[in-house]
Amino acid sequence: MTKFSIEFKEKIVLDYLNGGGGTHELAKKYGIKSNHSILNWVNQYQKYGKQALEVRSSKRVYDGKFKMEVLEWMWSNRASLSESALHFNISSASSIWFWERKYKEKGVEALFNMRGRPKDMITKHKLNKGEQEDPIEILQHENRMLRIENEYLKKLKALIQEPQDIDKSKR
């Protein structure tokens, strides 16, 4: 069961858009703990309409390619987690935070690891059905991963050299 119905969220959003008060006032008026929830609902409503207020299944699975696309967009646009979630219509910004943390701790491949059945079992199943992975697609994926890894290493090197540059300038 959801905490707030779609109708309730829409009522608050329309109240906000019609000048019924700011997020703090509306949060108090309607008994909502966080004014950030209201702001999030307003932004989603403005970008995607009423259906954006619907509660989505938590079972939604994003593939590694999509996760990398989200992270690349967020980094290149210097966007916040909330802005990135809104841009890609992801219901929870914390998902992006989790992907970024996984990427920083375990690398690109961690984003492509699926929960559940091991990848080799899936591949064997596909091959049994007569489906084969396209060699060009495999090479494109590998090329993209290498580019991302290269970019990451450049940024890491720059961050490591930054304190050294500061120390030299103090002398």
Image: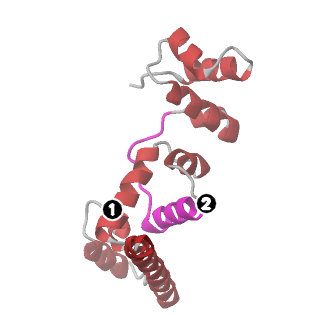
Crowd class of label 1 (few under 14; some 14 to 19; many from 20; radius 10 Å): some
Q: Is residue 60 visible?
A: no
Residue 100 or 125: which is nearer the viewer?
100
Which three-letter amino acid code belongs to the residue tagged 1?
Answer: Lys
- Of discs 2 and 1, which sits in the foreground? 2
Using the image, tell me which numbered label, if any, was put on residue 10. Answer: none
User: What residue sits 51% from the left and 47% below the top?
Assistant: 90
Q: Is residue 32 visible?
A: yes
Quarter where residue 153 is shown: bottom left
Q: Where is residue 81 in the image (x, y as percent from the top left)?
A: 50, 49
Using the image, tell me which numbered label, if any, was put on residue 77. Answer: 2
Magenta region, residue range: 55-76
Quarter where residue 22 is shown: top right
- Marks 2/1: CA–CA distance: 20 Å
Residue for badge 1: 102
User: Which quadrant, please, contains the N terminus?
Assistant: top left
Q: Position of residue 152 (x, y in %)?
A: 43, 75
Residue 24 or 44: which is nearer the viewer?
24
Residue 44 or 84: which is nearer the viewer?
84
Query: In the image, is residue 31 part of the stretch drawn in magenta?
Result: no
